[in-house]
Image (cartoon, rainbow, N blue to C red):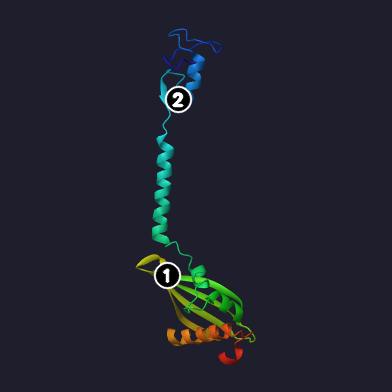
Amino acid sequence: MFCQKCGTKNDETAVFCSKCGADLKKEAAASVTQTQSPVTGITKKKSKKIPIILAAVIIVIVAIYMMTNSSGVDYEATVRTFAPLQGVPHTYGNVLSKYIVSPQWSVRREGDTRYVNISGTIKGTNSRMVVTIRAVPDLNDPGMVIITPERVTMDGMLTTSSDQAGEVLMDMFVAYDEGWDDISHFLNP
């Protein structure tokens, strides 16, 4: 056993250092954060800075990734839970899930804009519907998203404007509000 004070090699059963008289058991207990080279007998304190520096580097990397690759917004969930009609609690998720059989939700990114696509078969028909909703981060509030209907496609026939897409979706919301089971008779896909 090496003395923590002077570095002298002592017998493993020794209680005190044979050179300086230091209490070897007390020094050994206090040296939990120190290491000693058995060759040179020089005592070195272990650095506590390395774990702190490593943690700081990881935090910086995660922060940079989040700032450059994501705004922290779950666009699918945001669109799914969005109620576009003021004073009406119905959401895109409620309405589209009622009138599209097993709707498939996906998100496509183009720059800062996300396009949330909801696709499936229209209930009561064999016709396929794809609803595309545009979601753009609000420049005034990064945690908020501006959501607007982009287009609705039924059996490959595309609505020509976001206004027409909005009208189709509005009809779906009205049908939902009035309790209709399906919308096949007024969509005429």
* SS for callout 1: strand
- Position of the C terminus by quadrant: bottom right
Spatial CA distance of label 2 from label 1 is 54 Å
| Contact flag, marks 2 and 1 (Cβ < 8 Å) | no
Q: Earlier in the sequence, mark 2 or mark 1?
A: 2
Q: Position of residue 102 (x, y in %)?
A: 62, 76
Q: Can residue 161 be seen by looking at this rendering?
A: no
Q: Position of residue 162 (x, y in %)?
A: 43, 84
Q: Position of residue 2 (x, y in %)?
A: 48, 15
Which residue does the image show at 60% across and 92% down from the upper left? Answer: 185
Q: Relative to the observer, which residue lies in front, 88 or 175?
A: 88
Which residue does the image show at 56% across and 79% down from the upper left? Answer: 95
Residue 102 higher or lower than 184, as above or below: above
Q: Extreme front residue here?
A: 87
Q: Amino acid at mark 2?
A: Gln
- Left or right? Give the position of 29 relative to 44: right
Q: Position of residue 37 (x, y in %)?
A: 45, 21
Residue topped by disc 1: 145
Residue topped by disc 2: 34
Q: Can residue 76 be seen by looking at this rendering?
A: yes
* SS for callout 2: strand
Q: Amino acid at mark 1?
A: Val
